[in-house]
Image (cartoon, rainbow, N blue to C red):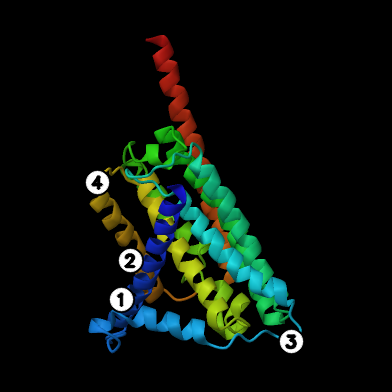
Amino acid sequence: MLWVTSIFTIVCVLIAVAFYTLYERKILGYIQIRKGPKSVGFWGILQPFADAVKLFLNELILPMKSNKVLFMMAPILGFSLALFLWVIYPSVYCIKFISFSLLIFLCISAINVYCILLAGWTSNSKYAFLGALRASAQTISYEVSMLFILIVPVLLIFETNMEMALKGYSVMFLMFPLLLVWFTTTLAETNRAPFDFAEGESELVSGFNVEYGGGLFALLFLAEYANIIFMSTMSMIWFFYNNNSFLFVLGIVFFSTFYLFARGAYPRHRYDLLMMLCWKSFLPFGICMLFLCLLCWLIMMYFNYIF
């Protein structure tokens, strides 16, 4: 029964990613005063499936001097890790219970760095390798700040299991600035604009995935968008209290839409400013919020001990 639900979850994630790409192109189209996809199917509804068929039917071209086995393994590994994250997805209809799902999320997201570095290194291209180094440094840096930010709602809710965290309370109303820092951190963690330095067209020619095409590029593409939707899910789990399934999904769509608005509204920043934002702003802020939370716990324990 478990493998049936896992396959069903994977199919649902792939369908969600397909329509999220259509949603992104529509939102960016209206931001830029144009229609977006509108020819394939009603209102362009079949455009994601047409793009998927086109990509997977393209000829598989491997760079002559690349490490071909690892070159093909990197997108498969990245796509697999993106789907593994959805194993810990909380649901009232879930038949599995994972006690420390937050720790599993941190472990899988840490391994994701190796996929980017492997894709750039095995391409045997200086542009791909530079893009992989930049993306790896960016991802590792923001994982540190993301960890400190996530510990704060964990201490407030006193729970590391995502299913039990949904029965807590809305941390957002206590620490709204923490939610804003968390959202900006997830933008950098998923390599999304305005922090998409791994794909700087002007200096890296699409970055670590420059040598990929066809089905292998589609796997990298699917992994990126699956991670975006999962990060939106994490925002709803740890910062909003909601047991209503409809409102929970609506909140995921709400957060996913802000990723698109950020891409349409802000230009790409400088790389040194991005790293400075992490190490000199977000990381000290996360540590200060963590100490504030611990101080509140100590004060509560002290008064409970007295009275």
Q: CA distance from mark 1 to mark 4?
A: 27 Å
- Residue found at the very far right of the displayed protein: 65
Q: Quadrant of residue 134?
A: bottom right
- Marks 1 and 4, the one that precedes in the sequence: 1
- Circles 4 and 3: CB distance less than 8 Å? no
Q: Quadrant of residue 15?
A: bottom left
- Marks 3 and 1, the one that precedes in the sequence: 1
- Circles 2 and 1: CB distance less than 8 Å? yes
Residue marked by disc 4? 244
Q: CA distance from mark 2 to mark 4?
A: 20 Å
Answer above or below: position of 65 versus 222: below
For label 1, the SS is: helix
Tell me which amino acid carries mark 2. Thr
Q: Residue 257 got which mark? A: 2
Q: Residue 64 got which mark? A: 3
Residue at (49% x, 75% y) in the render: 268
Residue 240: image location, x then y, percent: 32, 46
Q: CA distance from mark 4 to mark 3?
A: 53 Å
For label 4, the SS is: loop
Residue 51: image location, x then y, percent: 42, 83
- Marks 2 and 1, the one that precedes in the sequence: 1
1 or 4: mark nearer the eye: 4
- Using a 10 Å C-alpha cutoff, classify the residue at mark 2 as few (fewer than 14 neighbours), some (14 to 19) or many (20 or more): some
Q: Is residue 86 left or right of residue 246?
A: right
Residue at (38% x, 54% y) in the render: 233
Q: Is residue 210 left or right of residue 230?
A: right
Q: Residue 27 got which mark? A: 1
Q: Is residue 8 visible?
A: yes
Tell me which amino acid carries mark 1. Ile
